[in-house]
Image (cartoon, rainbow, N blue to C red):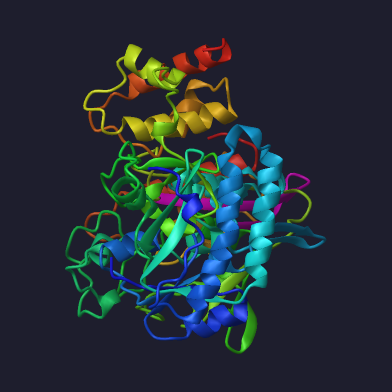
């Protein structure tokens, strides 16, 4: 998963047509944006938004494009830009797991029903199984791997362990990402808000009560500085 | 999922030209479409990405109401302060759709155009009427979630939450096609299966919704969306109702009652509306409106429970819209 931005820009493979070339040129803009975003903490969100607006503006001025077969894309995952080749039909979930090795994001129903594949896109929870990888370019993607800082677990992870909020654990990364999105926006949620934030996640072991307890505990810890 | 060519049009004209081609579908948020493609229910060779079109992500307030771009997400609608205040049933309906993850990506246009959830239709191994087969399997099969109001021969229920709310608010859609644009009132947008068996609305190949226009409600208008579902955290409606009431001097001047989960279209109950207009809204008139809403209900073998549920949902929604409780 090394950052291979330095290898860009690639020459388009020989089998592509002109419109593909146009598309790749547009991609250069998204790649630049992803690189900007990868400096993470340094960059104010305002600047990111401006850059994104400019990307869109560039895109809208460009000619129509089409993507056939495989194309080279850049995804900004956990603050680093990753370049990979995907077919148009590859979901963000499969790109994250199979090509980039972010296997914390789980593939269960693959139909937008269970929540195990939840990642954050520009800070908001989404089902990565229900999004095309090519559509996730230029967006800030966060997976469960971004939470721990070395050995230091995120308060949500710590609270899940201490409150025994998992049995088989397969749904856990999805729940944690949904709850992280909540706590980032609402540091002091009500129990009802915590439940609503998890409405798109299913735990077949049925540990919901412990999950909600862990969410409230993590909220307390984050407010008191960890 | 079958491989597809992914088109990124920069203009609506380009998009509609592409959409008129064979084996081509439009994709916005993709929350319904991608699942249908994975199941092999839809197998387009070309997808036209509407997200590449500029200027369709805004909610604009005009003197006469709201203009909502077709790519506005359900989360954006649910959180919009003006929609919450003045078009309340729409915000409540958007908030009742699916899950936070789906609302963050799913668009208002996609919500209106999503395909039905009928389990016979969704099963790729069942060739039902809607897919060109020779029978509706819901008629004699497990029809617990199906329509109680339908002219036949298909008994799907329309799955959208936002459609009843928008219809009750008198909204219309702008449809772009090869020959320019046309405006269609939502009342005329959705079609019963006796008019259109394969689709659920008037959109033709090569056409796409670009905008939704919602007229500004008259003074004294309040609206509510009430949805009953089997699983409260994430489900389609068993029965839902959008109710828009205009009340002045204690008397209901105008009422629009549109039902979800009971018919192949968002179903406007003229009977329920009539039961309210010209009267004070109270427990008795709300109950009468609930009863009136069931006038055309003819349940199938397993969905009779929807009739009393419909009566209760409409009564509850009318009382809530009038600021009363049931």
**Residue A78 % position (x, y):** 47, 38
**Residue A72 % position (x, y):** 43, 62
- Residue A31 location, quadrant: bottom right
Residue positioned most to the bottom: B179
As drawn, A205 above or below B292 = above
State the residue in front, A41 or B162: A41
As drawn, A167 above or below B326 = above
Q: Residue at point 33% right, 42% down?
A: B230
As drawn, A221 above or below A98 = above
Question: Split into 4 quadrants, where in the image is the N terminus of chain B?
Answer: bottom left
- Assess whether residue A47 is covered by the magenta stretch: no
State the residue in front, B82 or A66: A66
The span shown in magenta is B237-256
Q: Is residue A82 left or right of residue B74?
A: left
- Assess whether residue B246 is covered by the magenta stretch: yes
Secondary structure, magenta segment, majority class: strand
**Residue B3 % position (x, y):** 31, 71
Q: Residue at point 28% right, 70% down?
A: B2
Q: Residue at point 42% right, 24% down?
A: A148
Q: Is residue A62 left or right of residue A16?
A: right
Whether residue B55 is visible: no
């Amino acid at each position: 998963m090394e950052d291979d931005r330095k290898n860009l820009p690639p020459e388009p493979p020989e089998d592509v047509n002109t419109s593909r070339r146009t598309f790749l040129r547009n991609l250069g803009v998204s790649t630049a944006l992803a690189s900007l975003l990868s400096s993470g903490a340094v960059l104010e969100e305002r600047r990111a938004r401006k850059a994104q607006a400019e990307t869109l503006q560039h895109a809208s001025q460009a000619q129509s494009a089409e993507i056939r077969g495989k194309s080279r894309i850049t995804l900004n995952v956990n603050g680093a830009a990753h370049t990979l080749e995907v077919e148009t039909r590859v979901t963000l979930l499969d790109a994250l797991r199979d090509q980039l090795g972010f296997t914390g994001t789980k593939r269960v129903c693959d139909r937008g029903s269970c929540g195990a594949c939840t990642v954050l896109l520009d800070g908001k929870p989404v089902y990565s199984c229900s999004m095309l990888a090519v559509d996730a370019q230029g967006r800030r993607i966060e997976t469960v791997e971004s939470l721990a800082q070395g050995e230091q677990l995120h308060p949500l992870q710590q609270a899940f362990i201490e409150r025994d909020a998992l049995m088989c654990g397969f749904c856990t990364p999805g729940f944690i990402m949904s709850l992280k999105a909540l706590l980032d926006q609402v540091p002091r949620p009500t129990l009802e808000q915590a439940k609503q934030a998890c409405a798109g996640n299913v735990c077949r072991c049925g540990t919901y009560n412990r999950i909600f307890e862990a969410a409230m505990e993590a909220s307390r810890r984050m407010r008191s500085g960890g | 999922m079958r491989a597809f060519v992914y088109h990124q049009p920069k203009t609506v004209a380009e998009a509609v030209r592409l959409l008129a081609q064979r084996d081509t579908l439009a994709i916005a948020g993709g929350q319904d479409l991608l699942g249908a493609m994975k199941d092999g229910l839809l197998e387009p060779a070309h997808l036209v990405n509407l997200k590449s079109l500029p200027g369709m992500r805004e909610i604009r307030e005009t003197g006469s109401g709201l203009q909502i771009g077709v790519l506005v997400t359900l989360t954006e609608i649910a959180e919009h302060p003006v929609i919450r205040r003045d078009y309340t049933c729409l915000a409540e309906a958007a908030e009742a759709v699916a899950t936070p993850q789906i609302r963050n990506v799913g668009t208002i246009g996609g919500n209106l155009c999503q395909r039905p959830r009928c389990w016979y239709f969704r099963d790729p191994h069942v060739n039902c009427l809607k897919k060109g087969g020779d029978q509706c399997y819901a008629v004699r099969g497990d029809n617990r979630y199906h329509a109680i109001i339908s002219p036949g021969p298909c008994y799907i229920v329309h799955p959208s939450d936002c459609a009843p709310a928008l219809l009750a608010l008198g909204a219309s859609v702008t449809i772009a096609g090869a020959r320019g644009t046309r405006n269609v009132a939502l009342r005329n947008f959705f079609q019963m299966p006796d008019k259109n068996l394969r689709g659920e609305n008037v959109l033709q190949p090569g056409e796409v919704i670009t905008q939704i226009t919602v007229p500004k409600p008259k003074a004294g208008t309040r609206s509510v969306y009430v949805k009953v579902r089997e699983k409260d955290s994430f489900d389609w409606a068993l029965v839902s109702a959008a109710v828009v009431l205009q009340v002045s001097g204690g008397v209901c001047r105008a009422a629009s009652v549109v039902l979800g989960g009971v018919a192949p279209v968002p179903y406007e109950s003229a009977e329920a509306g009539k039961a309210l207009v010209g009267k004070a809204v109270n427990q008795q008139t709300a109950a009468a409106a609930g009863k009136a809403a069931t006038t055309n209900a003819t349940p199938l073998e397993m969905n009779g429970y929807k009739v009393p549920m419909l009566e209760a949902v409409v009564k509850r929604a009318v009382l809530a819209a009038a600021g009363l409780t049931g």
